[in-house]
Image: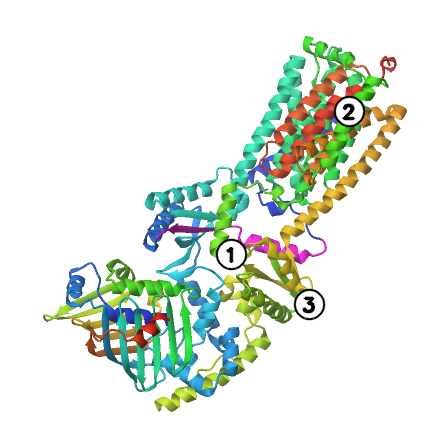
Amino acid sequence: MRNRWAILWTLVVLAVGIHQVLFWRSARLDTDVLALLPEDEQAPEVDAATRRLADGAGRELVMLVGAPDWASAQRAADVATRELAADSSLLAPTATDASALEAAVEFYRPYRDRLLTPAQREWLSRATPDELGGTALMKLYQPAGPRLTAWGEDPLGLWPDWWAARAAESAARPRDGRLWLSGEGREWVLLTWRSQVSAFALGADARITARVERARAAVTAEVPEGRLVAAGVPLYAEAAAAQASEEMSTIGLGSLVAVLVLVWLTFRSLRPILLVGVSLAIGCAVALSVTALFFERVHLLTLVFGSSLVGVAEDYGFHYFAARQGRSPDERGAVMRSLLPGMALALLTSVVAYLALGVAPFPGLRQMALFSAAGLLGAFLTVVCWFPSLDTSALPVTSFAARFARTLPRWPRAAPTWRWGLAGAAFAVALGGGLWRLETRDDLRQLQGAPANLIADQRELGRLLGLPSPAQFFLVGGADAEEVLSREVSLKQRLDALVQARVIAGYRAVSDWLPTTAQQREDAVLSARAEEQAVAAVAAATGEAPERARFSRDDLRPGPFFDGPAALAIRQQWLGLLGARSYSVVMLRGLNDPSVLPRLAEVGQGLEGVRWVDKTAEISRLLERYRRIMGGLIAVGYVAVLVTLVIRFRREAWRAWIPSVLGTLVTLAFFGWTGEPLQLFSVLGLVLLLGMGVDYGIFLLEHPGDGSAWLAVALAGVSTLLSFGLLGLSATPALRSFGLTMLLGEVSIWFITPFFRLPPGKDAS
Amino acid sequence: MKRWLLLVGMLAGLSAQASELVTGVRARLENAALLRGEFEQRKTVAGFKKPLVSRGDFVLSRDKGVLWDTRAPFASTLTLTRTSLSAAQGTSAAYHLDTVKEPALAAVNELLFALLAGDVATLSSRFEVQGELVGTAGWKLTLTPTDAGLARVFRSIRLEGDRYVRRVHLEETRGDSSLIQFDHLRQAPPLSDAEARRLAK
């Protein structure tokens, strides 16, 4: 019977092994913080927009090289470029050269007559024939002008201004064949590079970061007052990968070593070490395989979080060996059978708790939940199916184990005495005070563990370049492209007022590059009338017969436009058809002050199809909502756990239950006293605590007065504590607060549980 | 418009190239703080059979800027300072650009003032300079843009002169060309109050 299960499990483990080999060969690990964030079921188009904006930037590297004067800025840019170009398999310069602009100019050329700026529109509709003729003549007689066309194609010289308006969407201007901008006391050269490596394949060796650092060093070597400011998703991805791999080894190896040392101290035998090690390895492999099967990509933070699994999954092995110690090898089947109910109940509560984490619609969290639940199950099955077959020889009780087991009877019991009453009252006051002072925080930044220098660079770059914000934008929807574009126009009219009032620096909208058909026709009529008058005036003044060129008879259509070279700068803001409707994104520039956000939200109000999206605020609201939901869930969970315990332990069930409740309250009170705010991730820690904390009580109730159960509980407590304590070292604030919660909660529960063990009379059973 | 600045700048000091030719030309050019004169421009434009001829006068102040006043066939003015460029026709302003709104103008102005100061490095970074010294006082230069932005506008710029620039020939990349000749070049009188006011705007 037992052998059959062992064989079955062996087959599963083999399959997992094969899957592991395949998985690591083409590891698709996700470092993107966005991937952790919840999907918005109500507005999938908002997600699509956010993702599109993020994907567009996925491989981009933007750098500014600055120096006090233009000549040294150029020199600095040259040395930086040389460093960046040194490894062409890693980075390639983005084509921002003249050929791209030329292609866009050629594409627009047949439609020149229907591309007007608002100011031109206004001027053309009020200018007298004299004014038009005079302007045309003046421009004609200038020695040379920045013409993009022959004279007859643009007699009033309108087109360069239209292009200047498009160029104004970026702070950088062409100068000496470079992109230049001036700001914060320096002259800057803009460099844009593209990673040749997929963001998912970026390793912990941080090659791109190293390249950029060498370029930075080269810049300061060339120009002592020079500066290089760099930002881009690849840098964040590398930082995240490096950080995650470091944390995985600290947490994973740290807890593994701790577990193995504990096993050695307790059992003084190689076999338990090997077997516990095997159960952990299989648990982790199963966890990873199951996660990879359910999710397209495994997130790095899942692995970091998963490293703490080691400290939880060893429990089953400990329990087995603690119970088995000193018994004859023939009894091992019986030992396992006697342990099974308690272990299964402990597994059940832990798995349910882990899976409860997945209630929140955060894909990252769901991964972590699935990963941990699968890992626990894997370790549990390994212990149950394999250990009795593999653990064949004697395992004497060590003196350490015997000594430790004897500490249990000496542990005080809570009793209805006045001393205990006093201690309880003091305890209650401390708890109440802490809970009173408890604060909450729901901030997106808790997900962001990026190094401070990257964030500082990103901010500086945003300030200098006036980059549009990727987290706050308007989403414009409509039945078709024309409706979307015309709704953009209404929105832009309101935004213009804010630009005038310097609330924002500007905006980027598709309709500036692709006007609505109605606008195109109107502008074509307007420019035709004005330019005919201008040409006639020039003809009269020069005595010649110049002609105005013909333009395309067709409108500029979305299809050809987005397929063409002119859409390069704006394509990512066009979402096109999503379901039955079309969408575009209007981005805002110079949005550096969060206090103006409410005014922008107001702008979108009352405009049909226009939706203001503030991703940062939305996520914070969501974090808050789920903090409350999960908080409620904990209360419900405690009731459910109590019911489960009552079914098994009847009137003594409270003994396993009350330590977890108290541990949770102690943790919250501690947070209150220390000023650590309560956030979603600490609440999630409390959820998990509920599932794992009762395990200690369960084992002590299952095996009352049994020194070996106490030993196992102690070992499990110490190792769990270590692994979550190590998680508290993570640079990701969310994981840190999670680890801290678990650490505090586990310590207190572990400490409190023996106070509530069964009274001596019932020990004997 | 921006090319305007460049042109006007070139009239002024011309100069510059770290070669014998450039040294020779710089030695022959007078480094005047103020220059006045008349100009005649013949512009050949696609779509027009005859060259478009215009005449007028100009003042160049090395410190303050340039006034370029066309008198015939119609009156218009162009004012250039370190931070702005504006054109007017009669009493109405046709356009006004300043470096705050149009930062690229600052780059052009910087180029112009580099030219005025005989900044060899700046000019030779944008043009390949060829030419010869003529007789005891004259010279000819051909400037070919090496800068992609300039090359999109000019195919080449030819200059002739002695102690002053006498002829400028602009060949545009799109085929149009302008020949500007200067006459009555002199260094006096100094800026009038009216002129100084226009340049102070």
Disc 3 + disc 2, Cβ < 8 Å: no
Numbered label attached to residue A304: none
Disc on the earlier residue, 2 or 1: 2
Query: Depth check: B190 or B160 in front?
Result: B190
Do the residues marked 2 and 1 share a common chain?
yes
- Toward the front, the furthest residue is B193
Is residue A50 rendered magenta in the image?
yes
Disc on the earlier residue, 3 or 2: 2
Query: Depth check: B27 or A468 in front?
Result: B27
> Mark 3 against mark 2, which lies toward the viewer?
2
Is residue B195 rendered magenta in the image?
no
Q: Amino acid at mark 3?
A: Glu
Boundaries of the magenta span? A41-68
- Residue designated by label 2: A426
Distance CA(mark 2)–CA(mark 1): 56 Å
- Residue designated by label 1: A467
In the image, is A155 to the left or to the right of A506? left
Distance CA(mark 3)–CA(mark 2): 60 Å
Disc on the earlier residue, 3 or 1: 1
- Please report, as a chain letter, where disc 2 is located: A
Residue A14 visible to an observer of this rendering: no
- Residue designated by label 3: A608
Task: Give the SS element for disc 2.
Answer: helix
Query: In which quarter of the view is residue B155 placed?
Result: bottom left
Q: Amino acid at mark 2?
A: Ala
Task: Give the SS element for disc 1.
Answer: loop
Q: Amino acid at mark 1?
A: Leu
Task: Give the SS element for disc 3.
Answer: loop
Residue B116 visible to an observer of this rendering: yes
